[in-house]
Image (tube, rainbow, N blue to C red):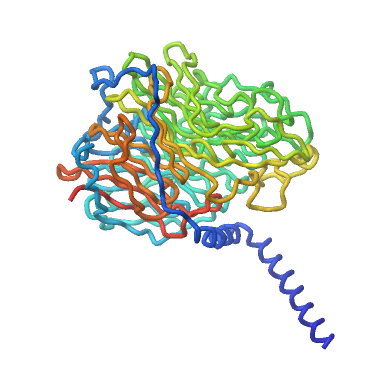
Amino acid sequence: MKLRLGAILGAIIVIGIVTAGLLYAYWDQAVPVAALALNYVRYWSAPAGTLETQVAKTTTASPPSAPTASAAPEVASSATEGEWPSYNRTLTSNRFSPLSQINTANADKLKVLCTYDTGQHTGFTSGLLEVDDALIFVTEYDLFSIDPATCREKWRTHEDYVPATPQGVNRGAAYLDGMLFRGTQDGRVLAYDSKTGKRIWQTSIADPKKGETAPAAPIAWNGLIFIGTAGGDIKGVKGRMYALDAKTGKIAWEFYLVPKTDQDPTRGPEGASPLNTSTWGNTLQGVPITGGGTWTSYSLDPDTGLVYVPGGNPAPDFGADMRPGPNLFTGSVVVLDAMTGAYKSHFKIVPKDWHDWDVSSAPAIIRTAGGKKVLSVAPKDGHLYGFDLDTNTLLYRTPVTRIENADAPFSPGKPVHFCPGSTGGAEWNGPAYDPQTNLIYVGEVEWCTTASLLPAQKIAAAKPATPWSGEASVNPFNTWGKPDRVFDWAGWTYAVDADTGAWRWRARTNYPIQSGMTPTAGGVVFFGDMGGNFYALDATAGRKLWGQKIGGAIGGGVITYAVNGTQKVAVATGLTEVLWPTQITTAKVSVLGLE
């Protein structure tokens, strides 16, 4: 009997050792599988979606106004007003659609008309394009073109490659002159024929062996494609911004978003930069300058020829004392000459970041009812910022989600619970502006984090090319801190006066909001939440016009367009990813409209 028990125990030990060895050898493959299994169990108790709107009792907000010549919504010169030709519709990232067929009087009659299923379980955060009679979107490995009215597949192009990290995400594609452009998780930019999906060129802008990737949605203008590199949470990675020739893929310019040293590679002509290491002050051995990745999208002002680049956080994320100084240009919006890459200015949004509060999403460049030219920015710190672009001064900083312990310092052995958490605030989709109401709409995450800091020497001892937060946890899913319990979270949609920063109305959902925000001339604002619930609200007062669960987590594009004179709404659903406990389902695109 003892021999049998000993044999069983020995077998268990051997199986454990073998399993541990396999997990170590295939860690990048094991993490997503384990996360999906865990999230599948978590989602058994998922509640139905709820939404509650509050209207401000008193307000100093400007009154709603009809569009004027100066505030009229921009229409891309290469597209009709019924298309959605760029990640945020316009290069200035306003996201406002001039379509009004779906409006406050009939939005309650919305129906899901058709759905395209990718068949993939993936981190589906892709923005959507509708251009040249095609609906375009991406996953980690695939680029899709479907009929925008029927969801019938036109073509699908698959890419085989080894990703730099297990986080299978991509924010979307760009379109210019019959070509499509996308980044990859092994650090390349790829160009395709938009009619056939045939690859035209490829250019490498990153080193996947270091953990560098290119998941951002590019933007296109004046013969150039603009995209940067991600991976700023990986030890030793330095974020960079690029412009590439649209026809050939040749790098037109390169700009380091954190100080470059002689050891760093040069891939193209360098944009003039004032950066040096003086704003960092790293002195401890094993603490290289790290951070500044860009992983969402960008904005560009065609009137001035300036590109606005949201710069990610410094690393180690939680170890602020290890990198003294303001850590430029992390936590900033960096303004560059679009044709040369030369530095023009920057807006330091997060003065000193030790919470993983990236300035992540593309800012909106707007002309308000009061005549101000405003840069609207929503980073992960839970605030909406407005900057006067004529004077480069801050107009307002409005809280738009739960804020707690934002100033509490981190030290070893003293866990800190803070809000927004490291996955809180605004992530990859930024603000939208409606010139008819003079309101800025922003979706937010309310999900707090508890972080514990390692001693400095242990943080410095981390291996290069590995995640580098400084978190003291053996749980691999707590690399960026321990989030609050699943479903102990919420989402917010805030409608904020563009001139004053005062909120007019706000809607609270019981799931985080990370989708695109889309206001329209019909007086409706569309968005979705991470429970798969899709909403249409009255843009002026926040009243719910329509709401229904239409699929898995909505964390990607929400757009509207016209096909044969009929307005449609397209929504990316089915985000399943390591960091988010969501319904396990395949990535899909659904098209809604009026019957």
> Is 40 positioned to the left or the right of 455 in the image?
left
User: Where does the N terminus fall, quadrant-wise?
Assistant: bottom right
Query: Which one is in front, 187 or 147?
Result: 147
Q: Quadrant of residue 41?
A: bottom right
Task: Residue 193: tell me if it is visible.
Answer: no
Q: Position of residue 47 (x, y in %)?
A: 46, 54
Seen from this angle, which residue lies furthest bottom? 1
Nearer to the camera, 239 or 494: 494
Residue 227 at least partly seen: yes
Q: How many marks?
A: 0
- Above or below — where is 451 with respect to 257? below
Q: Quadrant of residue 173?
A: top left
x and y, in percent, of residue 450 in the image = 66, 42
Name which residue lies at 43% across and 34% down: 430
Give the farthest residue toward the top.
391
The quarter of the displayed image where residue 374 is located: top left
Q: Is residue 222 above or below residue 179?
A: above
Outermost residue toward the front? 57
| Residue pictured at 45% horizontal, 37% vertical | 492
Q: On the picture, is 461 further left or further right than 241?
A: right
Q: Up-down: is 323 above or below 567?
A: above
Q: Is 449 left or right of 319, judged from the image as shown?
A: left
Give how far across and how far down residue 221 sits, in percent. 35, 31
Q: Position of residue 569 (x, y in %)?
A: 27, 45
Q: Nearer the viewer, residue 387 or 242?
A: 387
Q: Is residue 139 left or right of residue 38?
A: left
Where is 546 relative to 242, above or below?
A: below
Identity of the residue drawn at 33% across and 13% down: 371
Residue farthest to the right? 2
